């Protein structure tokens, strides 16, 4: 049941499978909560069991999720987990592929929706969380190599916190969504 590394995506069909808001959300729920039954996933996403089951099958066909039969209490119960800790792909591998555009667009919309959800619900958090949350944006002048270096450092920093085992040190921890975006642009 341990997630295995980060999967390098080379197949357009896998990107297409990921390019659906509910499938993206199912992957997120499995990342945050670990292996879950279809019923638990339906409850956590507010979707019908049949709809969740359909989208899990699409994700399974692309080897993004897999069943975990050893967790089932009986033959009717089906548990699912992510196959890997995350995914990544190179834009160069999918230069003019609509599936890559859809996946990247969904990622950007997902990040924006997470920020909007925080704004809508931040009143329900204690002051310590309000003081700790952040949004940072900055214009810089970089070469392609420097942008790549910055991205790799951010990925490593996120992995340092995201890949650690759950700590049992008495501190309150909540799921926290981290996002960073860097690309050439104009103000």
Image (tube, rainbow, N blue to C red):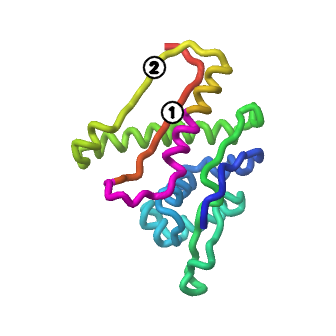
Mark earlier in primary sequence (1, 2): 2
Q: Nearer the viewer, residue 54 or 85?
A: 85
The structure residue drawn at horizontal position 30% and vertical position 42%, both measured from the top left corner, is 120
- Decide: few, some or many residues near mark 2? Use Cα within 10 Å; few <14, some 14-19, many ≥20: few
User: Was residue 23 drawn as part of the magenta stretch in this picture?
Assistant: no
Quadrant assignment for the N terminus:
bottom right
Foreground of the two, 58 or 144: 144
Q: Nearer the viewer, residue 145 or 92?
A: 145
Quarter of image, res 2? bottom right
Does residue 171 lie above or below 120 as drawn? below
Q: Which residues are magenta?
A: 154-172
Which residue is at 65% across, 36% downward?
101
Q: Secondary structure at mark 2?
A: loop
Say which residue label 1 marks: 180
Foreground of the two, 157 or 179: 157
Q: Please say if 137 is above or below 128.
A: above
Residue 139 position within the rendered picture, expressed as x and y whole percent measured from the top left: 49, 16
Numbered tag placed on residue 138 in the rendering: 2
* Left or right position of 37 against 64: left
Q: Residues within 10 Å of mark 1 (few under 14, many from 20)?
A: few
Q: Are marks 1 and 2 in contact (CB under 8 Å)?
A: no
Answer yes or no: is residue 157 visible. Answer: yes
Tell me the tag on residue 116: none
Q: What residue appears at the point 49 percent right and 66 percent down from the top-left corner? A: 41
Query: Residue 111 location in percent, x, y?
Result: 48, 39
């Amino acid at each position: 049941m341990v997630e295995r590394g980060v999967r390098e995506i080379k197949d357009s069909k896998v990107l297409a499978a990921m390019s659906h808001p509910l499938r993206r959300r199912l992957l997120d729920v499995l990342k945050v909560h670990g292996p879950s039954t279809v019923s638990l996933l339906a409850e956590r996403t507010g979707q019908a069991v049949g709809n969740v089951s359909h989208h899990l099958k699409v994700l399974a066909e692309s080897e993004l999720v897999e069943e975990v039969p050893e967790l089932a209490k009986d033959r009717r119960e089906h548990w699912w987990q992510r196959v890997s800790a995350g995914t990544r792909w190179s834009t160069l591998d999918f230069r003019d592929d609509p599936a890559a555009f859809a996946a990247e667009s969904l990622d950007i919309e997902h990040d924006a929706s997470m920020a909007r959800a925080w704004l809508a619900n931040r009143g329900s958090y204690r002051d310590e969380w309000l003081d700790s949350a952040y949004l940072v944006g900055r214009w810089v002048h970089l070469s392609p190599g420097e942008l790549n270096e910055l991205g790799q450092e951010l990925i490593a920093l996120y992995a340092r916190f995201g890949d650690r085992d759950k700590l049992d040190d008495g501190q309150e921890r909540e799921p926290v969504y981290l996002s960073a975006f860097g690309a050439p642009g104009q103000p």
